[in-house]
Amino acid sequence: MEDLVIRDADVVDGSGADSYRADVVIDDGRIVAIVKEAAAAGCQRPKAVRELDAEGLVLSPGFIDMHAHSDLALLRDPDHSAKAAQGVTLEVLGQDGLSYAPVDDRTLDEVRRAIAGWNGTGDDIDFDWRSVGEYLDRLDRGIAVNAAYLVPQGTVRALVVGWEDRPATPGELDRMRQLVAEGLEQGAVGLSSGLTYTPGMYAENAELTELCRVVARHGGYYCPHHRSYGAGALAAYAEMVHLAREADCALHLAHATLNFGVNEGRAPELLALLDEALDAGTDITLDTYPYTPGCTTLVALLPSWAHEGGPREVLRRLADDGTAERIRHDLEVTGADGCHGVPVDWDTIEISGVTDPALGDFVGRTVRESSSLRGEAPWATARRLLLDDRLGPTILQHVGHEENVRTIMRHRVHTGGSDGILHGAKPHPRAYGTFPHYLGHYVRELGILSLEECVAHLTARPAARLRLPDRGLVREGYRADLVLFDPRTVAAGSSYATPRTLPTGIPHVLVDGRFVIENGRRTDTLAGRAIRRTPLQLA
């Protein structure tokens, strides 16, 4: 007998087609039979060791988080309910050009400090890997949900060039090409960049194009956090489209939104740019989260020149009064490139996490609120926090526009990505709520997308971008990565006040045919593994 039959589910299969009622049979981690309208037809119904009554529930493919920052969280927290309880069965890691492979000892130490605000310092992690393949092997020991990995271009540049703002030499470029190729051959699905983060932002387009040619030869995709989401956002999108064309490389635009006052209401301009490129044959997809604030580290707002040399040099510059004043002027007057070319508004910068518990009073307040309480200028407070927390603070940046969010999520190449930073006392609610928020708020309450459309955005479309031949649809022969949810009640529990609250209306989640969420509770199952790209035969 088969392992499990899910009876009388309303199947939304991920294709965008209308739902249908069926029994779905699972065995050995795969969907082995789909019997439509079994009860009404009066036919012999499939039997299994276990039966689950899905009356009133939607059965869909598991959700794919195309932009996740769980690189250490998956190892640190076997429970990982932040994502599992949302119905996420696959996350894409290695985002924004900075992660933990490939590295050597020096680079690992630098990267850990540079993105401590995303993932913590990692003092509780045994970093027993250095290559991409070794990191994926570490994931294979057992994690809550599946994970794919992008080779992080900034980490590669740090390893080869360092943290200097200069062009790579021909020899260094060759070495970076080699590292990217090795990462892809070891199973990475593509290349990411963080072009408002150092050292990735120091790369010129010619350098990025050469790396993307390597990605294209291996059948991967390029996922840039491009050079501006603010003053130069539309030009930055156009720059990435041109680069992808030059390299003949598939392009996936990370957290593809338009923020700050200069971009209010400009989403149609972005979509027109993308439609023109798509109609001309460029392979483009994008992801967004269904919220208006962004989330990053406080140190990321600083101008790029302040980062040159790495985290130790950033701290040295912040400690020097004269240099710190130059940084303040760039932030508050000129508009630093780290802040997307827009002068910082300290009323929009909310501290969401710190690494030193002694600084916890700053969390949940804007920089201006804390500075007022301290009787000092906002930059003095921000500078103090960066120095005392060793660059660790995480922030919410309240600079988005709801009409842009709604317009972009309707687009034909849109997918879902949480950009969920799980570190910090008050993380962005998207980390715990992105996928149920799509289904509850934007589908049921607002009708921005139909249920079938939304599920396709969150399942089959990202699976196609990842070129996964047996995930993202409810089909016979496909992996049984599945979620059952109640369309009448599904909703994000997380909010800005209570960001770690789990969602409602998602009673069951299966990874590889095994329950990771059962009757609304996390099981002890670690069914997730690294999802590796199958290497192509190169000409």
Image (spheres, helix red, strand yellow):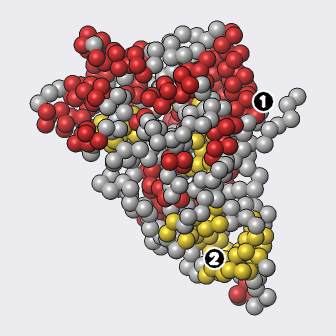
Question: Which residue shows up at 74% across the image and 42% down it?
Answer: 533
Left-right relation of 342 to 462: left
Q: Which mark is residue 9?
A: 2
The N terminus appears in which quarter of the rendering?
A: bottom right
Residue where numbered disc 1 is placed: 217
Percent x, y for residue 16?
65, 61
**Mark 2 falls on what kind of element?**
strand
Residue 220 can be seen, yes or no = no
- The single residue placed furthest to the bottom in the displayed view is 42
Q: Nearer the viewer, residue 42 or 242?
A: 42
**Mark 1 falls on what kind of element?**
helix
Task: Name the residue type under label 1.
Answer: Arg
Asked whether disc 2 touches disc 1, contact meaning CB atoms under 8 Å apart, the reply is no
Mark 1 surroundings: few (<14), some (14-19) or many (≥20) residues within 10 A: some
Percent x, y for residue 357?
29, 41
Alpha carbon distance from label 2 to label 1 = 42 Å
Question: Which residue shows up at 39% across the image and 47% down it?
Answer: 428
Percent x, y for residue 208?
63, 21
Left-right relation of 134 to 265: right
Question: Which residue shows up at 64% across the image and 24% down it?
Answer: 243
Q: Which mark is residue 184?
A: none
User: Is residue 5 positioned above or below 378 on the image?
Assistant: below
User: Is residue 429 positioned above or below 388 on the image?
Assistant: below
Residue 364 can be seen, yes or no = yes
The C terminus appears in which quarter of the rendering?
A: top right
Task: Name the residue type under label 2.
Answer: Ala
Question: Which residue shows up at 21% across the image and 24% down it?
Answer: 380
